[in-house]
Image (tube, rainbow, N blue to C red):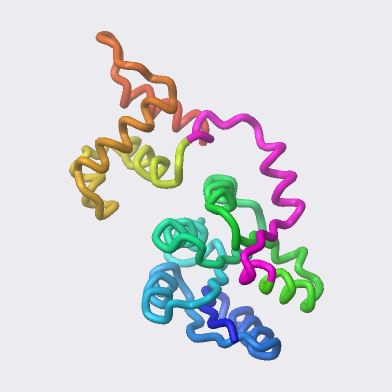
Amino acid sequence: MTRVVLAEDGVLLREGLVGVLVRFGFEVVAAVGDAAELTAAVERHDPGLVITDIKMPPTFQDEGLRAAVRLRRDRPGLPIVVLSQHVQHDYAADLIGTGEAVGYLLKDRVADIAEFVAALRTVVAGGTVVDPDVVRRLIRRPQDPLAGLSGREREVLSLIAEGRSNSAIAAALFISDPAVGKHVGNILAKLGLPPTDDTNRRVLAVLTYLRAR
C-alpha cells in the first residue's frame, strides 16, 4: 500500500481525492492545505507518493509547484504528481527535468478516475506522466532569456530585482552568503553578462528579468 501525502487547499476537492485514493488502495497519511504543511508532512511521514496542487496559500500563485521542486531536490526520486488548472511555465520544466517518477496533470483533463489512478501508479513505479497539453505549451513557449536558470537561480534573481543584497537574499532563502554568491555568478554567466568596467551586471540581469516577465 503506497503512503500518500496530499496537498490541496480546496476542502471539497481534497476530501474527494482522499476518497478516491483510499478506494483504490492508497494510504493517505496526510492531507494538507498549503505548501508549508506539505513540506512538514513529507518530512514526518516519508511517503511513497506526493500529490500537490500548484496554487495554494498564501499567494495562490505557484507555492505547490515550488515546494515540489524543492522536495525533489532534497529527496531525489520521490514520486510527485502535480495537479493544476493550467501550465505554470516557470517551474514546470524544472520539475519535469528532475528525472523519473514525476507527473504533471491538468485537472480539467482528468475525466476518468481509472486513468488518473493508473497515472499515479505509473509515477510510483518510476515512470513519468505529463499531460500532452502541458508538453505542447512548453514546446510552443516563446524563447525565454531566463530558460537556462534553475528554480533557485530564478528565486535569487527575483530578490535581486527587489534590490536585496546578497546577505538579505541569504536570509530570505535560508542559505549561506557564499551560496548566494555562487548563484549570482551562475545567473550572470547564463545570461551572458561577462565582467566589464563600464556596466553593472546586476542591473543588466534585473532588466533581463523584468523584460521576461
Q: Nearer the viewer, residue 136 or 85?
A: 136
On screen, residue 17 above or below 115: below
Estimate the x, y position of residue 148 in percent, counting from the top left: 50, 34
Dividing the picture into quadrants, the one containing residue 120 is bottom right
On screen, residue 108 above or below 140: below
* Number of numbered callouts drawn: 0
On screen, residue 183 above or below 81: above
Write the start and end of the magenta stretch as one range: 122-148
Q: Give left or right: position of 100 versus 61.
A: right
124 in the magenta segment: yes
Task: Identify the residue at horizontal 45%, vertical 32% (top origin).
Answer: 210
Task: Identify the residue at horizontal 66%, vertical 88% (top origin).
Answer: 25
Residue that lies at the very extreme toward the top in this rendered image? 198
93 in the magenta segment: no
Estimate the x, y position of residue 198 in percent, counting from the top left: 27, 9
Q: Nearer the viewer, residue 65 or 81?
A: 81
Task: Identify the residue at horizontal 71%, vertical 44% (top origin).
Answer: 137
Q: Give left or right: position of 173 versus 135.
A: left
Residue 9 seen in render: no
